[in-house]
Amino acid sequence: MKRFLVEFAMGTDLHGQNVTKAACKAVRNAISNCCLCGISDCLGVEDLDNKMHIHVKLGSTNPDGIDVEQVKKELPLGTVDVECVPGGMQCEGLHVDEFGEGDKITMVIAALTVYIKD
């Protein structure tokens, strides 16, 4: 496999301290900032589902709390693996009963590496 792209982003859960929700937002943010047209235009790859692999690395204050299967659903093409490591951040936010438990803002950092299979 050869690396084609590395993209990164942050996702947050402003009220519920849900690391899976923040991780999914981070992945969505990362993929919304890049266009993979070079895979087909320059490399001639047409079958992205079989030729593309995406490695997702997530930094979170609670890496074991991330539902990796839910995160994988954010990436509709290719094969996907997810690695969760300590990182991310929490800071004081605002407690609003209607939005969830707690007053912490939870941040997860995502780095997505797109590989093209030989």
Image (cartoon, rainbow, N blue to C red):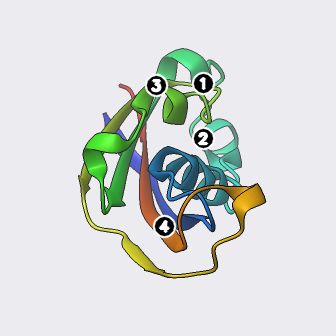
- Classify 21 as above or below 99: above
Q: Which residue is mark 1?
A: 48
| N-terminal label among 4 and 2 | 2
Residues at circles 1 and 2 in contact by the CB criterion of under 8 Å: yes
Q: Quadrant of residue 94?
A: bottom right
Measure the alpha-carbon separation of dots 4 and 2.
34 Å
- Which amino acid type is marked by label 2? Ile
Checking the image for residue 106, the label placed there is 4
In this rendering, which labeled residue sits more in front, label 1 or label 2?
A: 1
Residue 24, percent from left and from top: 57, 46
Q: Image quarter for residue 32? A: bottom right
Q: Residue at x 48, y 67 (%)?
A: 106
Task: Tell me how far mark 3 sits from mark 2, CA to CA.
Answer: 26 Å
Crowd around label 1: few <14 · some 14–19 · many ≥20 (10 Å):
some
User: Could you tell which of marks 3 and 2 lies nearer the N-terminus?
Assistant: 2
Disc marking residue 69: 3
The span from disc 1 to disc 3 (Cα, nearest Å) is 20 Å
Query: Which of label 4 and label 3 is nearer to you?
Result: 4
Q: Of the residues under marks 1 and 3, which one precedes in the sequence?
A: 1
Q: Which mark is residue 39?
A: 2
